[in-house]
Image (cartoon, rainbow, N blue to C red):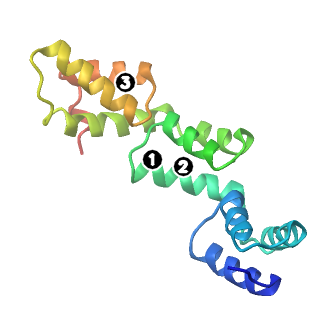
Amino acid sequence: MKLSEPQALNRVASYCSRAERSESSVRKKLVAWELPDDAIKRIIDRLKKEKYLDDNRFARSFINDKLRFNKWGKTKIIFELKKLNIPSSIYDPVLDELAGDEFEKQLMHILSVKVKSVKAKNDYDKKTKLIRFALGRGFSMDLSIKCVDKLLGGDYEEYIS
């Protein structure tokens, strides 16, 4: 689909006003509309100037959503942000603001739910399955082992809400 520059600006402004967007996702959309590179640069600059587009705001929103709603760990969040071409200088401060406590509480909660459905032959097998589950959600190995040990040791009542 080929659009003129004003049409593309209106459409992409509407796209950005519905939800936070990254610069790379907007750029992909503009490239798909077969706009010349100089027009893409002008549109993105204008969107930034008018505060439709802000990678800092996008990263903060993305991290909060993925942590709270998708229950992702730090590793998976960072991986997805890298796929969206967000520089680490933008997302590192946001992740540092979130205390390790936040990720630990989240992991303890999802593990306490998961442990009820895990079928295992013995404790070692159960522990291995829970650690693998936590790693798949993007939590670090250290945190995964720590939380699974707490959970299987019976020291987790405070995390269930």
Residue occupying the point 24% across, 24% down: 129
Residue occupying the point 87% across, 71% down: 42
What element does badge 1 sit on? Answer: helix
Residue 94 % position (x, y): 62, 44
Residue identifier under label 3: 144
Q: Given contact means CB atoms under 8 Å apart, are the residues at marks 2 and 1 in contact?
A: yes
What element does badge 2 sit on? Answer: helix
The mark tally for this picture is 3
Residue occupying the point 42% across, 21% down: 141
Q: CA distance from mark 3 to mark 1?
A: 16 Å
Examine the image and state in which quarter residue 124 appears: top left
Residue identifier under label 1: 67
Residue 7 % position (x, y): 75, 86
Q: Is residue 133 above or below residue 82?
A: above
Residue 104 % position (x, y): 39, 32
Residue 63: which numbered mark, if any? Answer: 2
Q: Is residue 41 above or below residue 138?
A: below
Judging depth in this view, the residue of 111 and 160 nearest the camera is 111
Three-letter amino acid code of the residue under disc 3? Ser
Q: CA distance from mark 3 to mark 2?
A: 19 Å
